[in-house]
Image (tube, helix red, strand yellow):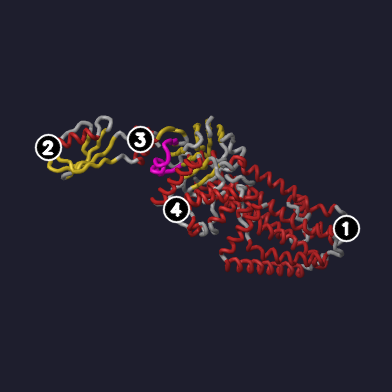
Amino acid sequence: MSFIIVKDLNKTFKVYTRDSGLINAFKSFIKREYKEIKAVDNISFNINKGEIVAYIGPNGAGKSTTIKMLTGILKPDSGKILIDGFTPSIDRIKYVKNIGVVFGQKSQLWWDIPVEDSFLLLKDIYKINDKEYQKTKEELIELLNLKEFLKTPVRQLSLGQRMRCEIAASLLHNPKILFLDEPTIGLDAISKVQVRKFIKEINEKKKVTIILTSHDMTDIEALTNRVIVIGHGKKLYDGKLNDIKKKFNNKKQVEIVYKKMTNFPKVKGTEVIKKQRNKVLLEVKVNEKTISEVIREYSKVCEIEDVNILENSIDNVIVKLYEEYNL
Amino acid sequence: MSLIKNYLSLHLKISLEYKSSFILTIISQALAMLVELFVVISLFYKFKLLDTYNTYEILLGFSTLWLGYSLVELFGRGFDHFSKIIVNGNFDLLLIRPRSLFIQIFGSDICYEKTGRVLISLIIFIYSSIKVMTNITILKILLLVSMVLCCSIIILSVLIVGASFCFYTIQGLEVINIFTNGTRQVGQYPMGIYKKVVRIFFTLVIPITLVNYYPIRYLTGETNNLIYLLLPYYSIIIFIISNIIFYIGTKKYTSTGS
């Protein structure tokens, strides 16, 4: 049986709507019109122990709502969630002992006091015994490189430092599952890489099951191969990231820098995008022509100095995916 | 227990981070309270209430209320500012911790700046209670303690009911302030000056008279009926009801933002 079972999950929000303008404001004051929005619409999936799963979708797709239901913050309208034998919204206190949550937009650290004091509070909240606390803390300090700023008040930390502390805070009680809601939001390149590396490490070392949402596709590419894509509350795709890539990434751009061209070749399955002196940019349909074939054809007519293969970035792949589902 | 201790020390640390602001606020809070005391006493003289009521009884009546109230201001600030927790979305963070919501809301804010008010009202409370009591017995001392604690419980209950509304309106209701501040304003004067309806309201719904007006009758020796010793504990029923209302509210919680 899977570690996390989600079946036919539904959640509807009532959003009240009104047109702009003062008169309409009065109108809606007297009689409000509500619109029902299906934030999560019949979603089902299973996740095994130790997996990393990325949960992606455009803004407002229902990612956060799902995460909130999985963490027991919101109660589903209908459907079943069974995680490690618990139903989150019913066995809240017993269930949340096993999970760690990082909300990229909300801090669980206390703003005015050193990080370590926040950790001590969490130690009491989770009733972690001294020995275990020391051990986990040391481990996390080393993994996340927190030593220098453990005694600094949170308000004086940089965003990257703070995010590392947030992640550490969510792992002090050795949870079995870690939920990361946009953990790299607003971070610079170095911090992003550090956070990713760390997420990967705890998954491997501690066998923590990780569910993350992110808009940063490079995050997801670096961390996992399984993605669940949702849009308008519906599950659109559940499977390997590579498969999406293959499906949408059938074109590659190749830039060829050459010397002495006799006559310009017409190669089937390619399209010239830009032609400059000594340089040509081609789009190659990978399923019709392999790149080596294209290069061979070109080398017949000219002396190739340099070849650059520009891979369609994962962001573009996802844009295409969203486009296909009309998101 | 150790969690409560940790919350208490955590907020003390936060207060001490801003040293001068902390000290000045304590002093100004205490001074504001003294001014208020002065106003109330002046009113008593003006309206000659002192002819019918013993000065110290009045003083004890409202210092009980003030002490109970300022204790809630000190320790119950999380409930007072609960709408903030909801609006910020920080309530989500309370729900993912394996502890009761009550203790976590208590721990979300403790306002040590109110210690000035607690001290001033404590001094008046002790002074006036000594003057009121003809003889001091253990039962009377127990009654005094229960008066203050139960008074805090009543005010806390009103705040909890107010907090429950946040689940429906997101922004807290200003109406609740009528009951919290109103209770303090109304309750500090002897109940005898009010109409019957008001008195019944403040006996059964917000049972302030049961923690000052009636128990003081026992303290003065006007009555020896032991029932009077138990009256303050009626507030526990109100407290339980308020918690039930809050619990129903949490089921309505829809969270904000992403």
Can the viewer see residue A280? yes
Q: In the rendered image, which residue does mark 1 sit on?
A: B223
The lab-note entry on whether marks 2 and 3 share a chain reads yes
The lab-note entry on whether marks 4 and 2 share a chain reads yes
- View extreme (left): residue: A262
Q: Say which amino acid is labelled 3.
A: Lys
**What span is colored magenta in the figure?**
A213-230
Residue A311 circle label: none
Task: Determine the CA span between mark 3 and mark 4.
Answer: 30 Å
| Chain letter of the residue carrying label 1 | B
The foreground one among B11 and B92 is B11
Label count reads 4
Q: Tell me: residue B71, above or below residue A167.
A: below
The foreground one among B10 and A63 is B10
Q: Say which amino acid is labelled 2.
A: Asn
Residue A160 circle label: 4
Q: Is residue B223 left or right of residue B81?
A: right
Say whether disc 2 or disc 3 marks the residue closer to the N-terminus: 3
Q: In the rendered image, which residue does mark 3 sit on?
A: A245
For label 3, the SS is helix
Residue B50 percent location from the top left of the image = 80, 67
The lab-note entry on whether marks 2 and 1 share a chain reads no
Residue A227 percent location from the top left of the image = 43, 36
Task: Determine the CA span between mark 3 and mark 1.
Answer: 86 Å
Residue A224 magenta-highlighted: yes
Disc nearest the viewer among 1 and 4: 4
Q: Are marks 3 and 1 in contact (CB under 8 Å)?
A: no
